[in-house]
Image (spheres, coloured by chain):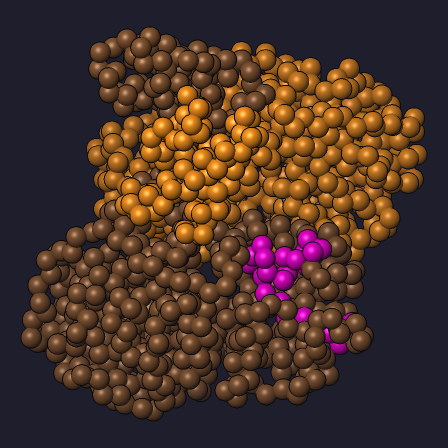
Chain colours: A brown, B orange
């Protein structure tokens, strides 16, 4: 649903458009000499469009550059971007964009934003870099990106700072945390994060990884808050692997495993289990094929060529040896699983012995689509396994106790929760205080909040904010969101509209003929002759009264009166509020 | 959000309108003499609008009469009703409407449907009857309902049948199951159902209640499937009561407890705990006040007059003695909790020492609204307790193991799962088979499926269905849903529309003046002069070419061409597909 944009064939181009509601840049003081300035530009009033700027010693470092899929509140919009106005006015100080991992809420903004901020060098790990490049290929005239691949043990000198990295557990390989060394201690950014653990005891690898912080002096921590409001520990991915392994080993019919193509770690495991148990993989879905190819290319996964079979050759193998990897577990209308569900898939029809594993949770907003998908699949007789009844999915974001453990390893002096709605940040802030951060050293940001730590001692949130109006992508265009447009769309989607056309004789002030009424999305006027006739009377009366009035020389007033009369009448008769467009032609 | 209709002040009236898409009634054979016919008319392809007809021996019995709130798929609609076409054509056989309990998905259709089916007598328990009456008062010219209150141990003779009842556990008092005695055994309908249990062992009362089935011969079971896909046992309501009791006892500041007003059992408990711990109750929300008054009136709850204090007098008591019962836990825009959240509540402003308990889960589709609510509440500093981290809510519908236990008590020969999406019914059907029902004796219905059990031996699903087109309430009107209208609204809500007005000289075929372009919800045309100018050129060209063509005598063709040219041009330039309305005035 949200990730598919079938209306955009071929490669996209990007046009920047100021928008009518362009927010004027506020006057923002320069950072004082001995301060670290931290500005979350996106991702702290929502899930998605993560981007944070860190500025000190005259240098700006940007952490991540994501986008967000559209919301109920932004109908017709494709994506929402972080507002980069602050950066655009300070391009000359930008020393680099550092990307934690390759998910769209961390890299999705790149094709739309890089030009605006002067196309800085991107620092990230190999897989993430490849994912960024693949995506850039979808854009015509996309900037030539400069991507500098980093190693985990590297220390990168940028401007006056040194940047280091650490491994974090998430759902895509090469996920990393970022350490910015400042004169007053480290600014640590975790990116998306969870822990590998067994019954709440973090693994040896996690202990090892976080042990680096024993010798570090952490000034400030910026950390993912997505699931911190959930109690306890999240299900570790290892449990999911065990469950999937058992399902794959024991399957007696065809198995369809549906998940996000971005869930690369899990995809790799499924391919591995398939080989281990002598089964064949059918990859159905372009993004999944692309991601598996990337993973193979850089050696993250190794498999024999004949493990993957083309969907049209699937019939050459007994059903119990077939595993179909499919996209569309969120109910996306154009994904392969939807086509399997509604029987429009070119090659796959379900049978009673097939099993469909939905290896994902349901993203809020997609419930209806997923329900419809499950209904369609089960109408064909397939057995469906979901994460409710079986551990076939785990979130990539840690729960409260994982966050608490990480806080205890990193031991920051200052804390800024990021990645989440305000409520989630608030819960995370409370947790940080419980784990020992002084309450005055915790700041809950909004998008654009300017937080400064002076001399490593004192945290303040400036009263002025960086520009934070919503920037959106719609079609080719990047623009500021128009509230009027959104309000109109919401109204139209519920109430429809009604165009009334009156041709008036300028000499007599009488209507030339019976007025025309054209409506869409309102009520079924064609079936409601009485309402049509009465509306025509209202139109005639309104226009003829207006024309008798001397101010009617100005047709605008007559139009306003007409729209108001018709709207009032229709509301009273139907309880609906269509947008009424009055057209008066004077001849 | 979904339950509030602020646009409807005062009492509603109901107009019936055929709609353009009126489904012609199919030819349905008469039931054979020795058969029981069961027709789920709503609630088996969705959650909501539950209604089932049972017909035998020339009598029709109707079980429940609910409605459903609108879906993503039905924008602008208020409610969706069961299609009662089958009943309308057989009014003379209807012997009664039996209502299992007072929730809107079981009684909401009554004001819209009773007239259409001949206003049969309603049989139900006292509280349910009062809830139905209260609701009917909101309608002008609502039918005078005939409600016959039943006792649990009564046996009602209706037509040739005897009807009996049994107590079931749900979230509203007076919930009951229904037993229709037929010559071939009982048709048992559970209504909404869960079990009271302790760690998976049903309570003594449940054992007692279901023991009646030991001596009965159950022909067919129709049972709630809402949560049967969830493993294990659901949280029992008793656990929720314990949690709420602890929270109420220990609260050191004001407590806001938000829940559905329909969750009457829990409301009663909260009032009870308040008295027990010497606290005062503030009731904020009309539906909650109404429901508590009804419960008090019929003796379901007793409390001292001074336990409830008016919201404006709340300040006379110390904060730790105040419990505010509020509606709006689903994020409903106009409910009291939303007004507390956005600081527009006349009397209540949150402080750092206040706690808000959201004693409900989130209905799919409301996630964003609830997230916004939580963000607003936590911005004011209130501590929020949700069902994720604490047992402050439990569903009213039992999980898989509860369903299994009930199946073992009732031991039906035939089984028809109801109340749920197809996937849920399918899971329930599999469960019934696992519990011993023969696979050929299980039928998964769609809305309108006609299922017959012949001579108590053989179940068939007729190839013909009862009318099942969607009936909807929009404003005052009850009508059949128009697919065209829904499609237009969805398009308008994303893409907007564009009216182009060309005045053409009928002699020269040239435009009289520059064409007008009026758009709403499309893109911000006013800011895009270039696009406006180019569109005007396209309009001029299209119309003038059309007018040169001899077929232009017919302006319709010219209009079609104009709409198509403009739509194609706008799509290419903006990637948007606004609905284009061409207006050509020939003068």
Residue A519 point in image, percent of width and height? 48, 28
Judged left or right of residue B56, residue A60 is: left
Asked if residue B531 shows in the view, the reply is: yes
Judged left or right of residue A463, residue B500 is: right
In this view, the residue in front, B362 or B29, is B29
Residue A369 point in image, percent of width and height? 57, 51
Asked if residue B354 shows in the view, the reply is: no
Residue B332 point in image, percent of width and height? 40, 38
Above or below, B265 against A91 in this view is: above
Query: Magenta segment range?
Result: A319-344
Number of marks in the image? 0
Above or below, A509 against B156 in this view is: above
In this view, the residue in front, B231 or B583, is B583
Judged left or right of residue A51, residue B17 is: right
At a point 68% along the width and 64% down the height, the residue shown is: A356
At a point 83% along the width and 28% down the height, the residue shown is: B28
Judged left or right of residue A53, residue B384 is: right
Residue B295 point in image, percent of width and height? 49, 27
């Amino acid at each position: 649903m949200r990730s598919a944009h079938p209306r955009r064939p071929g490669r996209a181009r990007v046009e920047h458009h100021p928008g009518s509601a362009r927010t004027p840049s506020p006057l923002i003081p320069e950072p004082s000499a001995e301060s670290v300035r931290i500005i979350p530009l996106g991702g702290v009033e929502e899930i998605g469009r993560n981007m944070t700027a860190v500025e000190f010693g005259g240098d700006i470092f940007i952490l991540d550059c994501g986008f967000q899929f559209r919301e109920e509140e932004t109908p017709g919009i494709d994506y929402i971007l972080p507002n980069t106005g602050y950066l655009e006015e300070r391009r000359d100080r930008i020393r680099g964009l550092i990307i934690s991992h390759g998910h769209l809420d961390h890299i999705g903004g790149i094709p739309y934003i890089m030009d605006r901020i002067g196309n800085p060098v991107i620092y990230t790990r190999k897989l993430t870099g490849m994912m960024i490049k693949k995506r850039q290929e979808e854009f015509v005239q996309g900037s030539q990106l400069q991507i500098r691949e980093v190693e985990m043990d590297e220390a990168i000198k940028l401007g006056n700072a040194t940047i280091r990295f650490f491994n974090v557990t998430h759902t895509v390989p090469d996920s990393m945390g970022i350490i910015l060394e400042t004169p007053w201690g480290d600014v640590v950014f975790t990116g998306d994060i969870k822990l590998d653990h067994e019954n709440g005891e973090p693994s040896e690898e996690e202990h090892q990884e976080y042990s680096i912080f024993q010798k570090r002096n952490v000034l400030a921590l910026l950390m993912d808050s997505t699931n911190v409001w959930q109690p306890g520990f999240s299900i570790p991915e290892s449990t999911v692997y065990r469950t999937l392994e058992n399902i794959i080993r024991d399957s007696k019919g065809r198995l369809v495993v549906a998940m996000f193509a971005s869930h690369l770690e899990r995809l790799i495991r499924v391919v591995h289990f398939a080989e281990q148990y002598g089964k064949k993989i059918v990859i159905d879905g372009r993004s999944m094929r692309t991601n598996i190819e990337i993973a193979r290319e850089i050696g993250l996964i190794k498999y024999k060529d004949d493990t993957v079979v083309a969907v049209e050759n699937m019939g050459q193998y007994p059903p119990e040896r077939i595993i179909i990897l499919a996209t569309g577990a969120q109910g996306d209308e154009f994904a392969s699983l939807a086509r399997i569900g509604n029987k429009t898939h070119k090659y796959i029809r379900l049978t009673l012995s097939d099993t469909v594993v939905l290896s994902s949770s349901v993203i809020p907003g997609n419930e209806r689509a997923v329900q419809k998908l499950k209904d369609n699949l089960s109408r064909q007789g397939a057995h469906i396994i979901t994460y409710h009844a079986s551990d076939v999915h785990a979130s990539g974001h840690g729960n409260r106790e994982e966050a608490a453990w990480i806080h205890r390893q990193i031991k920051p002096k200052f804390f800024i929760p990021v990645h989440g709605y305000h409520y989630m940040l608030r819960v995370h802030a409370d947790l940080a205080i419980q784990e020992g951060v002084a309450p005055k050293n915790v700041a809950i940001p909004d998008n654009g909040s300017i937080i400064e730590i002076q001399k490593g001692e004192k945290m303040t949130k400036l009263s002025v904010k960086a520009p934070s109006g919503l920037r959106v992508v719609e079609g080719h265009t990047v623009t500021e969101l128009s509230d009027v447009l959104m309000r109109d769309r919401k109204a139209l989607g519920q109430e429809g509209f009604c165009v009334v056309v009156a041709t008036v004789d300028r000499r007599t002030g009488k209507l030339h003929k019976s007025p025309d009424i054209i409506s869409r999305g309102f009520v079924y006027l064609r079936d409601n002759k009485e309402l049509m006739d009465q509306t025509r009377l209202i139109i005639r009366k309104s226009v003829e009264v207006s024309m008798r009035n001397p101010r009617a020389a100005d047709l605008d007033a007559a139009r306003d009166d007409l729209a108001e009369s018709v709207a009032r009448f229709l509301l009273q008769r139907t309880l609906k509020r269509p947008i009424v467009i009055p057209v008066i032609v004077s001849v």
